Amino acid sequence: MTPLLQVAGLGKRFGGFTALQAIDLEVREGERLGLIGPNGSGKSTLVNCICGTLRHEVGTVHFAGKQLDGLTAHERTRGGLARSFQLPRPFVTLSLAENLRIPILYAVNARGEGGLAGPAIDTRCRDLLAEVGLVDKAHRLPRDLTQIEMRKLELARAMAAQPRLLFADEVMAGLSHAEVDEIIALLLRLNGQGVTVIMIEHIMRAVMQFSQRLAVLVAGRKIADGPPSNVVRDAEVVKAYLGE
């Protein structure tokens, strides 16, 4: 079966600094992949290159059999890629429900595949907010949310685009143990609904609980890729995290 996402030989430079070097990565439909690595290892740069926020100089990215190189970020979103951000970026003057209308109107409906209109959009927004436990705050502004509620809104905004592949980029940073469990459960539900999920995360308990496979980046190179139990025992991975 052809992988949903195929990254081949991807490289990215910032001036004289090599941020990513010869990255190969494949993700199957419905898979849960954990992408880990020390700070500065290139994880977010890789996500940005795949999603179109950054342009890579070397290599190719294919998604659902289509080459993405040269496409803008919004074109990739309309094609079925979505992401959350480490720092939530809601429209601060819009209500929670209105925040979800934006990706529905400009990603889902822009595909021309029988988009939603009128009351159907309102229903979809409420369903998404109910999924993340925020339906009672549908008409509140983002400033009224707690930290974990802001993270849930960020995930709901990504899901409003109806992606086939979701990048969850450090959505658990700063959360309590119980709140981390809430986000894991939410991501597992989304995956159970057919969404492929790549989790970029530093909380190893969450990564191990969620992931079916781990890929590890260190200094812009992929040094390991495989079952979580094997990867965390890999000598090069242990060295990268713990030192000599």
Image: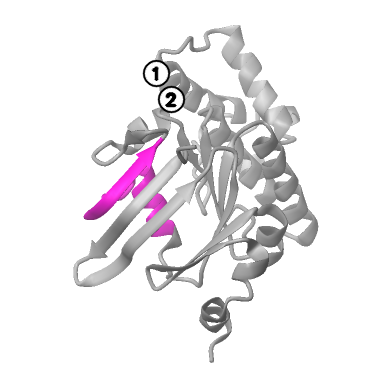
Along the horizontal axis of the image, is 94 left or right of 76?
A: right
Residue at the right extreme? 178
Residue type marked 2: Ala
- Left or right? Give the position of 116 relative to 129: left
Q: Is residue 129 above or below residue 73?
A: above
Up the image or down, 131 lies above or below 116; here it is below
The quarter of the rendered structure image containing the C terminus is: bottom right
10 Å neighbourhood of mark 2: few (<14), some, or many (≥20)?
many
Labelled disc at residue 110 = 1
User: At label 1, which amino acid type do we have?
Assistant: Ala
Q: What element carries label 2?
A: helix
Is-magenta flag for residue 51? yes
The verdict on residue 21 being magenta is no
Which disc is residue 107 wearing? 2
Q: Which quarter of the picture shows residue 128? A: top right
Give the image's coloring scheme. Answer: one colour
| Residue 234 coordinates in the image, percent (x, y) | 58, 76
Residue nearer the viewer, 55 or 155? 55
Q: Which residue is found at the position 59% from the left and 44% from the top?
A: 31
Q: Magenta span covers which residues?
A: 44-63
Residue 204: % across, % down = 66, 66
**Residue with the most extreme left position:** 15
Distance in Å between CA atoms under marks 1 and 2: 5 Å
User: Mark 1 touching mark 2, by CB under 8 A?
Assistant: yes
Toward the viewer: 97 or 107?
107
Residue at horizontal 52%, vertical 23%?
101
Label 1 sits on a secondary structure element that is: helix
- Seen from the viewer's position, the closer of residues 161 and 210 is 210
The answer to whether one can see residue 146 in this image is: no
**Number of the label disc, if any, that sits on residue 4:** none
Q: Residues within 10 Å of mark 1 (few under 14, many from 20)?
A: some
Residue 171 visible somewhere in the drawing: yes
